[in-house]
Image (cartoon, rainbow, N blue to C red):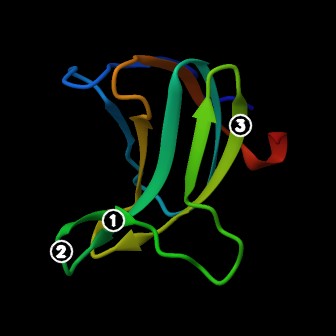
Amino acid sequence: MKINTEKITLTKLFGRKRIHTINFNETGERYFHIKVHNGAVLVIHNSYSMDSSNWVATPKKVTSYKSQHLIKAGEEKIISYTIGKIHNHHDKVFIINHHLFKPALFSICEIKKDKI
């Protein structure tokens, strides 16, 4: 079941929107269907670091957990992330325009686990 489909344009370097952030208010497994129409996007799962008071890439886990995905034009992918919480800060997912001088257009929607 698709919850809400969004079509988002990320601008090139020095544009107003090079990064799209997905915020969470609950922990647990989340699934996203991402389709890139133009350009390329990098999807990164980040956790809050109390040491640096900043968002850092999720450390490597013992299992085969992949925290970064590169999706190019014409490709679509279902991505699964386990969202955690550190000191009142839920993890975030950042979607970044991978090309400096080209805009990127993609669609994203969250899907339920039983509909994969």
Q: Is residue 4 visible?
A: no
Q: Position of residue 54 (x, y in %)?
A: 21, 65
Asked if the residue under mark 2 is in contact with the one under mark 1, i.e. CB atoms within 8 Å, the reply is yes
Residue at image mark 1: 56
Disc assigned to residue 52: 2
Q: Amino acid at mark 3?
A: Lys
Q: Which mark is residue 77?
A: 3
Residue 93, image x, y percentages: 44, 49
Q: Does 22 sit above or below residue 16?
A: below
Q: Nearer the viewer, residue 28 or 32?
A: 32
Residue 73 or residue 88, whichever sits in front: 73
**Gap between marks 3 and 2 measured at Cα:** 32 Å
Looking at this view, is 6 or 60 the one in front?
A: 60
Q: CA distance from mark 3 to mark 1?
A: 23 Å
Residue 114, percent across and down?
82, 46
- Could you say whether the residue bearing mark 2 is in a helix, strand or loop? loop
Residue shown at the point (47%, 51%) measured from the top left: 44
At label 2, which amino acid type do we have?
A: Ser
Q: Earlier in the sequence, mark 3 or mark 2?
A: 2
